[in-house]
Image (cartoon, grey):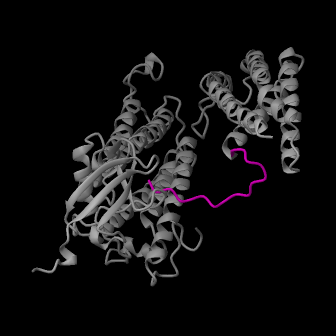
Amino acid sequence: SKHPDPLHTLREVEILDAKTREKLCFLDKVEPHATIAEIKNLFTKTHPQWYPARQSLRLDPKGKSLKDEDVLQKLPVGTTATLYFRDLGAQISWVTVFLTEYAGPLFIYLLFYFRVPFIYGHKYDFTSSRHTVVHLACICHSFHYVKRLLETLFVHRFSHGTMPLRNIFKNCTYYWGFAAWMAYYINHPLYTPPTYGAQQVKLALAIFVICQLGNFSIHMALRDLRPAGSKTRKIPYPTKNPFTWLFLLVSCPNYTYEVGSWIGFAIMTQCLPVALFSLVGFTQMTIWAKGKHRSYLKEFRDYPPLRMPIIPFLL
Amino acid sequence: TGEWHKPGRRRIVPSSVVLTSFQVMSRVFLIWAVTHSVKEVQSEDSVLLFVIAWTITEIIRYSFYTFSLLNHLPYLIKWARYTLFIVLYPMGVSGELLTIYAALPFVRQAGLYSISLPNKYNFSFDYHAFLILIMISYIPIFPQLYFHMIHQRRKILSHTEEHKKFE
């Protein structure tokens, strides 16, 4: 008689609701090397309203979510695995969110730039500013968001596929709201150009361009760190590109350059709402950078000790 | 978006930091940015209305916290805290709204706390419009706070009733 091979014994998986402990699904004859992703797909068949992206499966009702790549037989479960399910709510893809939140400011700013009716007084409809800096600002702002859209489509490699649906409303309100607020003043008929004139504008433009190039360089370096389709994480290091040398001092130089770009834009336009937008963005990016820095430190023993999260030596 | 976990904060009473900060800010705003800044409203009856409402609320609330911390909370105090708000909240809100409304014409006339274009910071602020927005914000916010307290009342006062049955 054949001895049953423990590695190839088919498993059973029962899925319970994490809150009510109600039995939602029972799967039998599951391959031991099946992944959580495959189990999620099987679960969707019996509960089609819970597509895989909104499923959180865990070993403990209050524990951490299991990853899609986790393999059933590697988990601390017997031949019958009990998994707890939590509904993450409606999900939306990161790409969709990014495209929507960036396309808005691009379009909205132009409405103010071209002085579309009902924004300023009727005598200003479709008129053009006589200040060079206003035209320059439009080019910079538009370039910034076109760059972001192209990066979303062609450069970024997202580790998560989706985020909760309510985020798109929150994020769009933030981006679109601030874009309208800044654009209103910069393109206003009563706009006052910078105090130090062309000198100030040239310096600010230089800061802006350098930081945009820097930010792009970091995005490319991060992309090259991760092969297509994978979700691996590695320590980023400086490359031949001098803009990436900021990695020596900072964990998230992309955020550093982003703050720099907006400071440049604020100096260029000498507009308080732009400065406030930069401040709010800086606050949020600092929170993200600190989080990222902490995960790097946790994951990699040999993480370079000189690096700070976002501002060299300081923050 | 990855949100970095906030470090723990020290708690002496179990109230929500967010809700309480909100209430403190709104009161500071009413006192400094409205009543103090617009002297003409200081003789309005609406000021008396919200001052009385706040005062009674706070006397009861802090008695509640003090007795709770001493582990000797008379039922009367608990009852008062979760019942009198039914009248005191609307009273306070009415006083606040009427005061802001009374301040509006004076704010507009004096251009109080307002800045207009052109200026070198390319910024403008209309305090009159801002105050109107604040008044409008009471519409979504007040019912939420009020029904939250009603919900708390049901939970906490019925819980005590059940305990009393087993004594």
Majority secondary structure in the magenta region: loop
* Residue A156 seen in the current view: no
Give the side of residue A313 with respect to residue B157, left or right: left
Whether residue B108 is situated above or below residue A139 in the rendered picture: above
Whether residue A258 is situated above or below residue B45 in the rendered picture: below
Locate the N terminus of chain A by quadrant: bottom left
**What count of labels does the image hold?**
0
Image quadrant where residue A118 sits: top left
Residue A308 position, x and y percent, is: 53, 72
Locate the C terminus of chain A by quadrant: bottom right
Give the residue furthest to the bottom: A302
Whether residue A121 is situated above or below residue A42 in the rendered picture: above
**Residue A39 shown in magenta:** no
Please provide the residue range marked out in magenta. B1-16
Give the residue furthest to the left: A1
Residue A109 position, x and y percent, is: 40, 36
Which one is in front, A164 or A175? A164
Image quadrant where residue A209 sits: bottom left
Identity of the residue drawn at 42% across and 40% down: A166
Whether residue B156 is situated above or below residue A41 in the rendered picture: above
Residue A19 position, x and y percent, is: 47, 48
Which one is in front, A152 or A11? A11
Identity of the residue drawn at 73% across and 16% down: B101
Give the residue furthest to the front: A1
Give the side of residue A61 with respect to residue A67, left or right: right
Identity of the residue drawn at 41% across and 31% down: A112
Give the side of residue A267 with respect to residue B154, left or right: left
Which one is in front, A256 or A10? A10
Give the side of residue A139 with respect to residue B70, left or right: left
Residue B103 position, x and y percent, is: 77, 19
Which one is in front, A277 or A305? A305
